[in-house]
Amino acid sequence: MTDQLLAAAERFALTLSQYGLQRMTARVMAALLFTQQPTMTAGEISEQLGVSSGAMSGALKTLISLGMIEKVPAPGSRREHFRFRDGAWATLMSQQNAVLALMTDAADDGIEVAGEQTPAGRRLEEMRDFYGYMLREMPGLIDRWQRTRNP
């Protein structure tokens, strides 16, 4: 990878970590996103990042569980190979539906306790309405985006 790509990948990882992703997970994700190779082994990723393979095993597991990366077969190689998944961004956003539903339910619970006609109840009602709207709209938004990618 060129120095410019490495720098861009590190900036991307820093941005992700500033918004809550664990630093190592963000760096591994960026390495797989920015690589020019079709796949990378854990050893190649750790060498590029200058970390031990053990330090990034949790990051690989996290990214696999999020649906962002996948293990792929590599004929002739005994090592595991990883790549950034096609459709990873839509998968990630689809998983956010569970978070949206939890936030909607949490607001409903709060309204029940606080009361609808209270200041807290009105704030919670806005929260419930916002997350409910996002929950209803997200599947259609993802479907429309996918149709633009695969007409």
Image: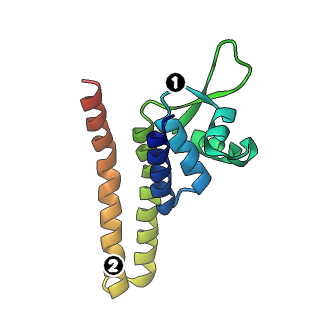
Q: Is residue 66 visible?
A: no
**Residue 123, which numbered label?**
2
Residue 20 in percent (x, y) is at: 51, 61
Residue 45 in percent (x, y) is at: 63, 37
Question: What residue do we see at 30% from left, 85% from top?
Answer: 117
Q: Are marks 2 and 1 in contact (CB under 8 Å)?
A: no
Q: Is residue 111 above or below residue 119?
A: above
Measure the C-alpha gap from mark 2 to mark 1: 48 Å
Q: Quadrant of residue 125?
A: bottom left
SS at circle 1: loop
Question: What residue do we see at 53% from left, 56% from top?
Answer: 21
Q: Nearer the viewer, residue 86 or 117?
A: 86
The answer to which of marks 2 and 1 sits earlier in the sequence is 1
**Residue 38, which numbered label?**
1
Residue 41 in percent (x, y) is at: 65, 30
Mark 2, Cα crowd under 10 Å, few <14 / some 14-19 / many 20+, is: some
Question: What residue do we see at 46% from left, 72% from top?
Answer: 109
Q: How many marks?
A: 2
